[in-house]
Image (tube, coloured by chain):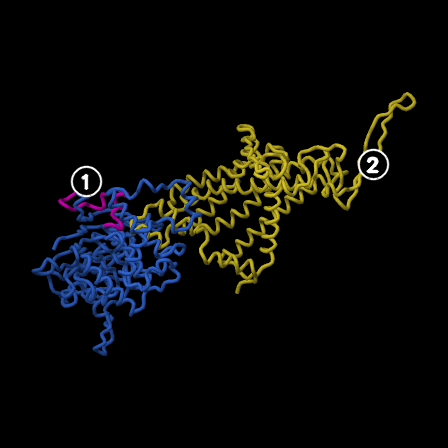
Amino acid sequence: MTDLLRARDLTARFDTEDGRVHAVESVSFTVEAGESFGLVGESGSGKSATALSIAGLLPAAGTITGGSLWFRTPELAATPGEHDVDGEFVDLTTLPANARRSLRGTEIAMVFQDPMSSFDPSATVGSQIAKAVEVQQRASARPRSTRSKTETYGLGSLIRDSLLPTRSFVSESSRERAIELLERVGIPDPARRAEQHPTEFSGGMLQRAMIAQAIAGKPRLLLADEPTTALDVTIQAQILSLLNEIQDDTGLSVVLITHDLGVVAHHSDRVGVMYAGELVERAPIDRLFDAPVHPYTQGLLSAVPDLDTTATPSPSLSGRMTGLHAHELPEGCYFADRCPQAMTDCRAHPEERPVAETDRHSARCVLTDRAFDPDRALEPGAAHEMERDHQ
Amino acid sequence: MMFTPRTRRALRRTLRRQLLPKLGVVLFGLLVVGALCAPLLAPHDPTTQQLDEKLRPPIGFSGQTEQTSSQLVDGEVKTVTETTTISATWTHPLGTDALGRDMLSRVLYGARTSLLVGLLGTTVAAIIGVPTGLIAGYYGGRIDDALMRSGDVMLAFPSLVLAVALVGLFGTATVRIPDPWVVLGITPAMPAHVVLPGTVVLVVGLVNWVWLARIARGEAMGLANAPYVLAARSVGASDRFILRRHVLPNALTPILVLATIQVATIILLESALAFLGFTGTTLSWGFDVSQGRDLLSTAWWVTTIPGFAIVFAVFAVNLIGDWFRDALDPGIDADGGGGP
């Protein structure tokens, strides 16, 4: 299979009043065309920041400070410009802002966690999807600009548009396309639904509508940031099978971000596990569940309640994730102070290494090439003290 | 649309349940009808001087004028003061001013100036202030600082001084709009034009845009982080598009409430400028107030009647503004009762 996206040592920082936050730390992974890549981790582990970095939507305080995001787009790679090109791949981090914007919706789209607040309450759902259709049409008509001649954004239009009915914004054809899209994502009576406001939709229906909006521009990469977290369980399953279905139809690649291992188990081909901004392990889905290497992955898996046994979930993941401010991060392995298998080797920050004989499975842990040695073990929670002694 | 269906429902509900919004609609309606139909309603030409009819009091009052004349009595010049009583007539229901112009007609025509300046001045303020505030709030950072500090500089100018300076620079820049009633031949050419004081409209806009910009900025700051703005960006929407389609419509309600109340402020400011003689038209309540101030002891109505008109207009507009605020502000109980 061909690769669609190659993230190499992606590093993103947030500047806050309390200092720099290391939100994404040297993350590398590959998304192949048509596959579903799962990104799991607890809250604040950098999953969303990774997705926002790929989409170019980091908030003002956030910047990509290192690494590269190679995205396969032959057309753009052939266009001369300042950006870095490698064969058919273009480094997204080197693209100017307007070129990144022209990729959004048409190449890379995103689905967000909370469908209820991801639609503008003041406009109809149909008009918002139709607008996404028009963005795509403009982009394909004039490749590197999404601005058409007929549409001006002057002061006059700002005033005029606020006084005219919303409907006049979108052409008849894109409105019809919006209704088709709503039908495609399984919304009954789409023509009537398109004329309704978001408040008249249920959460599950809105999430379907958001998927319709995301696929309006026929993107090749869909970043789904916890698309089911805000929904109840039966709706979650429906949304996931809808995503699967669309993926089968269109050959779309999906990066599925979730904290729910059950979701990735059913949906993803390969999985990356994030902890404290780092990708600590990535593997094909079967290998991750059968032979996890990183103790954090093991802990996550054992924390999933198992209906077949009466055993209570293992308490192996005690403690909290380290803070991500520069001064809070330990010198050694970020997970060491919670790790049941921490050794003196964990004093040094581990590199990401392939797990024996396969390059599809790698982990950022000393256990990739050696077994846990109880003689060199650290007491859980002693890592920080160790580090202080070390200093 | 300007209002969402929910907003329209809230406006209707408040109007139905509360007394003051009804009163506001009635009073403001009277004001608008009076201004629009002034040539039909006015009994006289408001600019015609009838010196033999001067200083007639309103119906129900009587007025006195002192006439001082010099007479030669026994070879000496003597000053004789004669006091004559002038009674009210139905020809001039609200009396006449010192030059015998009909007060009722002047009040009706003055409403045109006040409303026109109030509405256009607010429009000018909104055209400057709303985009400025939205851009400042949406982008934040240095753009925000630059735009809002320039607004603070504007506020530092006393509005009257600014008006004097601009009238000095540009003159009154009056625009004469032909009166449609006269053009269509329905009414005789009383004053054939509605005179719009251009500089005054500009001044009241320049003085008031900052308030609208501040409200717009605050709204835009919150909306810039709304999930639906992020979602719009994720499908490739531009900043301009987001500002226009997502930020502006959702920021509109508080802007509208403030703009309505600003119409009243601007009517007052127009009266003050007219009082000082900056408007370039004599058909203005403020101007009439200034004309009557020397006659306060003898002919109070020349000052008081246009003064009442100003109060009436400001009161009506404020009632409308309160209605919008009550209906649209989620923090205020739309039923008029106290919150829980």
Q: Which amino acid does label 2 sit on?
A: Thr
Whole-angstrom CA distance, mark 1 to mark 2, is 94 Å
Using residue B215 as the reference point, say whether residue A263 is left or right of it: left
The quadrant where residue B43 appears: top right
Figure colour of chain A: blue
Instruction: Classify B8 as above or below A87.
Output: below
- Mark 1 surroundings within 10 Å by alpha-carbon count, few (fewer than 14), some (14 through 19), many (20 or more): few
Chain bearing tag 1 is A
The dot on residue A79 is 1
Instruction: Classify B229 as above or below A379.
Output: above
**Residue B315: percent from left, percent from top:** 61, 49
Instruction: Classify A5 as above or below B170.
Output: below
Report the front residue among A37 and A362.
A37
Residue drawn at the location 68% of the way across and 38% of the way down: B44
- Let me know if marks 1 and 2 both belong to one chain: no
Question: Furthest residue to the front?
Answer: B185
Residue drawn at the location 31% of the way across and 54% of the way down: A176
Q: The yellow chain is which one?
A: B
Specify the quadrant that holds the C terminus of chain A.
bottom left
Magenta part of the chain: A82-106
Using residue B112 as the reference point, say whether residue B78 is left or right of it: right
SS under mark 1? loop
SS under mark 2? strand
The dot on residue B166 is none
